[in-house]
Amino acid sequence: MDALFDLGRKPPTTRTIALQVREHGAGSLDQAQLRADAARYQEVTCRSALNRVEGMPFNWTLNPYRGCTHGCHYCFARRYQTQFELGPDDEFSSLIFVKVNFAEVLRQELDKPSWTRDLVALGTATDPYQPIEGHYKLTRRSIEALIAARTPVGIVTKGPMVVRDRDLLAELSTVADCTVCLSVPTVDEDAWRALEPGTAHPLQRLRAVRTLREVGVNAGVLMAPVVPGFTTQTSRLEATIKAVADHGAAFCGANVMYLKGGTKDHFMGFLAREFPHMVTSYERLYAGAYASADYVRTVRALIDMLQGRYGIRPRKRKDEEPKEETPPEPQAAFEW
């Protein structure tokens, strides 16, 4: 029987896989199953599901998968692959780790008397509704556990599959709190095709927002990230914000893209291959991890103005301006 469905074989632990990749490379994962989407899926077991974080509006994160077939070129989670000694390029979108015991481990953690029902963020380093979720249903089973534990959750996804779980999300909204953020950086089709090669059409995602709102879920949109030169033109920003308003989103947040570590390496490589005329400008604009403070303020002011024009409630956001890095003055002149 195909190893993917072989119940007699226990998947290796995440640590075992990490050591194997470190010593022998990703090619040594002979249990990783190739599926029709051309990605390989490696089943693993995890010892914990809840991951403690600091400095965020939430204290805990949940990520039932590692890697993502959406393959967005700007994804900040690409840099996490380097912890596995995997590259942030194709291996991020073509080799996906599936934590098959994730929901069971989560339920055990939520059942502990010490659990205080803190806010949990689902989908911070992978998309919980990427296509493989249709097979494994780890996200759906995790939401069932969160309902049983009356634990509030915030979900971030680009996957319209989220509407499959509207029954559970509506129930969770009544017993605790539930916010769903659909990531829709732009409705411009050229920018979408260039930046998010494996994602559903932006309007599909907006229709998912409307569907969730109809069943009482607090669902909105994150224009995240706003990508200089691709989505920052006034006409593109206005088209996106108008579409968000037309689909009844409860809120709309926006963050200008930042680039760190392996993500920056990947994104600059992507530009060099596909948009070489933009490389020099990006090198100036992103001398560090963040675009210049003046540039960010300009883009943010434009978004705020457009949100006001279309009556969209902004999402409360952390200050995204760089504190530890002061970019050189020429960056402030960019008009993307």
Image (spheres, helix red, strand yellow):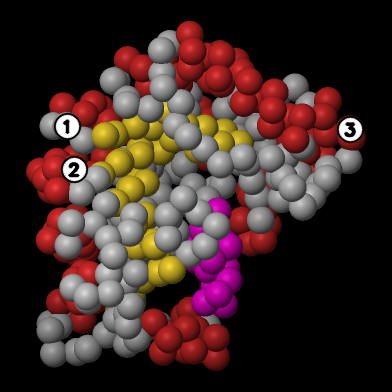
- Looking at the image, do the residues carrying marks 1 and 2 touch, with CB atoms under 8 Å apart? yes
Does residue 303 appear in the picture of this structure? yes
Q: Is residue 323 left or right of residue 4?
A: right
Residue denoted by label 3: 330
**Residue 83: image location, x then y, percent:** 55, 75
Label 2: state its secondary structure: helix
Of the numbered discs 1 and 2, the one sitting upstream in the chain is 2
- Against 310, residue 217 (above or below) is below
Residue denoted by label 1: 216
Label number found at residue 173: 2
Query: Could you tell me the amino acid type at mark 2?
Result: Ser
**Residue 175: image location, x then y, percent:** 14, 48
Of the numbered discs 2 and 3, the one sitting upstream in the chain is 2
- Against 42, residue 174 (above or below) is above
Disc 1 to disc 3, C-alpha distance: 47 Å
**Residue 292: image location, x then y, percent:** 77, 37
Q: Main secondary structure of the magenta part?
A: helix
